[in-house]
Image: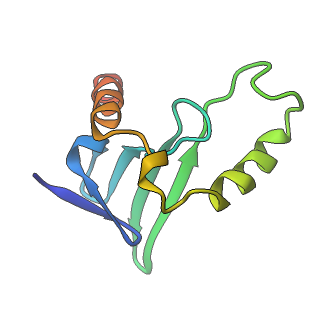
Amino acid sequence: MATFRFGQHIVKSSAVFLKTELSFALVNRKPVVPGRILFRFTIATGHVHVHVLPRKAGDFDKNDSIYDELQKHDRENEDVPSKWRSEEEMAKEATELHSLFN
């Protein structure tokens, strides 16, 4: 199975839903909100990546609470695989997204 490098992480191709010559997009193993995805782009000096978090009215008590949640989320359980989604869950989401982007 093909893999992709995302920083220090190795990502299985089953989690990638979009690929171009210089970029790829993947689903997140521990999303803050449903539908959180990551886009990675190759640039001359390395790479840049973008987090996309879909929002909906009322998803947080205060609109800006998402930033507090992100800070808390990034500190907790980062290296605890039991808190991650299964490969099957990620592959299912990637397949659904692939159909929207291709």
- Residue at 61% x, 34% y is 33
Image quadrant of residue 61? top right
Image quadrant of residue 5? bottom left
Q: Look at the image and tell me whether residue 17 can be seen.
A: no
Depth check: give the residue in front, 8 or 79: 79
- Residue at 20% x, 58% y is 3
Give percent across and percent down for residue 79.
48, 62
Does residue 44 sit above or below 13 in this rendering? Answer: below
Depth check: give the residue in front, 29 or 101: 29
Residue furthest out toward the right: 62
Give percent across and percent down for residue 76.
64, 57
Residue furthest out toward the top: 57
Image quadrant occupied by the C terminus: top left
Residue 96 placement, left or right of 30: left
Does residue 75 sit above or below 63 in this rendering? Answer: below
Residue furthest out toward the front: 82
Does residue 41 sit above or below 94 in this rendering? Answer: below
- Residue at 40% x, 77% y is 44
Image quadrant of residue 56? top right
Give percent across and percent down for residue 21.
24, 56
- Residue at 51% x, 31% y is 35
